[in-house]
Amino acid sequence: EYQKTISLDINESLLNSYNFLQSQFAENDSKIIFIGGSQVPLLMSNANSEDVLKEFVDPVADLYNNKKWKILGISLKDAHESILILLNRYSKKTLSENLKFSLPNILNEFSIAISKDIWSSGEIIDHDNLEISNKQIYNSEILISPGTSLINLFFYKNKTGGSFRLKNPSGMQSTAGDRSESSIIETPYSIIWQIKNPIPGKWNVEINNYEGQIQSFLQPSYEYQLELLNLNSKNAINQPLSLITFITDQNDVMVNLDHDISIQVSIIDPTGIETLYQMNDEGLKADAVKDDGYYSLEIPKINTLGTHKMSLQMKWQGFESDSLISNHEFESIFFPYMNFEELNISNLNIGNESNLGTLYVSIGDTPYPVDQKSINTTILTNSNQISDSYTLIPRRSTTDGKSAMYDVIYTPQEIGNTLITFNMNIDYAGRLYEVPAQSIQIQIVKIPTTFSIMQISGIVLFSLLLIIGIIILLAIIYRNLQTAPYGHLNDENGNLIVNFKTIKKPLIQQILHRDEILGTVIGITGLEEITLKYKNGLVIMNISDDSPRIRINSQPVVNSYYLKDGDWIGTSGKLYEFVINP
């Protein structure tokens, strides 16, 4: 019923491996890789596979399972079905996997399975994909860079036979010149070399007397590592990104390899676009000190939202095809930023209080309330003195006292130019973030205090004539600068209740406050004490303290709210949907 010669070979091999693992005091989850590619059936056509598996496979598999060791089964493309049955049983009994590989895609499949479970010391690199005919002599070159502490070379064949010889850059076979520093595992379908402390240069694998397909890959490990000093997991979009890296040895001690290397940065954005950058240690651009071992780079800005994959690649001169790689990733998101909207910053008078403008804090297009104490304001006068004669007044505050808009009130004490700078450091996205500073320059003047009666009369007369002459023009300009109301309210059934574009308002309000709608003209019970303000593409609902309770999207609202298309406004037991006109 069973090809006992083959079965005894398999069982004997697995038992020998079991004894070896025991002698090495192997830990839990240790693995044996069992590759099956035989086309010889293991079961006779009339055999009961379950009975055979219980007799020959289960006892050995149970030994492994009791030690929490695994048998990873790998079957090749042309393996007989009985091989698949056998590997499935071993993998199932030891809680492992059973993988099926085939050329030409064996490289990717095997590298994924083996690199993360067995050869975990470095990245696996695709090296060669060959189709050799006529049993010709073929040489496969492998470039090994300085600083390589170990390299694994994998060669896989789809047929048996052939001669494979590994030669170092001096032309000596590894078996002759590097035996103390190398080892080889050879099976009918694979050859694996492991070389410790290889000589830098071009190595060569000579393939002789073989006809068929070959795939090879290599896995280098280095005595150096690339350390990234200051990359945050989340970074602000549209802001500069500074990177500093240095090199350490296996003892985590920083080393300086002088000018023998170059370090390149590859960043792939969420859309798949790759951008390459060159770091430098030459004291140029973002690099502060030349030849100090710290390689620097400043990227002007990252302008794509989402997760970016970043790869640092260190290359040795003359070995550019080989590189030490360190992979990272970061997410680009919106962070808080400040914007100052100027109101009155020129020809300010000494001793007179002035509203310079409004400081807005936002994340993207959304206002972001912050505590007033987190905003650091520095006023540097014309004589390089620090002034504290200012006040930040919140426009509207949240229940915890924060605001996204602050009016800046300043009383000048000295003539000349004055520089005002706003800084802010806040905790955001798991770190202390320094919001980019905003600066403005204002001009302070001194108005003469002594005027003659004739001068005063002339000024008054001129002012009256000027006011009369331009009042109509100013009214027209002022009205046209204001945003015309838009949008409408529907009831719960979608029926139009109020159209803000055509709503009737008193004449004075139409002229002076075109961008505002008072709740008293809306005509809805519960909304009498609100005011709608249209500004810069925003619709702001301001709510007085005397207003009945108002809820938006089922949430109570205090002071103010930025209305968005589709918001539901609840008051006096009724719901109204705010809709922006198409």
Image: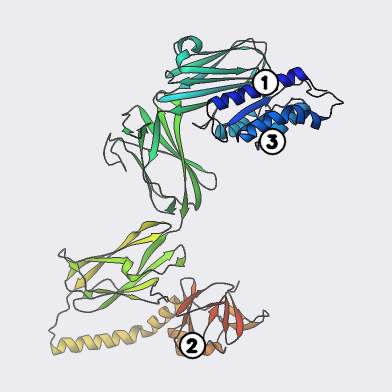
Task: Tell me the crowding category of disc 2: few under 14, some 14 to 19, or many 20 or more residues within 10 angstroms, Cα based.
Answer: some
Q: Are marks 2 and 1 in contact (CB under 8 Å)?
A: no
Which residue bears the numbered disc 2?
547
Tell me: residue 265, above or below residue 307: above
- Gap in angstroms between the C-alphas marked 3 and 2: 72 Å
Residue in the picture at 33% in, 34% down: 253
What amino acid is at disc 2?
Ser
Tell me: residue 281, above or below residue 442: above
Task: Tell me the crowding category of disc 3: few under 14, some 14 to 19, or many 20 or more residues within 10 angstroms, Cα based.
Answer: many
Q: Residue 317 falls in which quadrant of the image?
A: top left
What amino acid is at disc 3?
Lys
150 or 434, which is in the foreground?
Answer: 150
Return the mark for residue 219: none
251 or 515, which is in the foreground?
Answer: 251
Q: Secondary structure at mark 3?
A: helix
Q: Secondary structure at mark 2?
A: loop
Q: Return the disc, 2 or 1, that comes first in the chain's sequence.
A: 1
Left or right for 321, reference 72: left
Residue in the picture at 72% in, 31% down: 58
- Gap in angstroms between the C-alphas marked 1 and 3: 18 Å
Which residue bears the numbered disc 1?
12
Which residue bears the numbered disc 3?
93
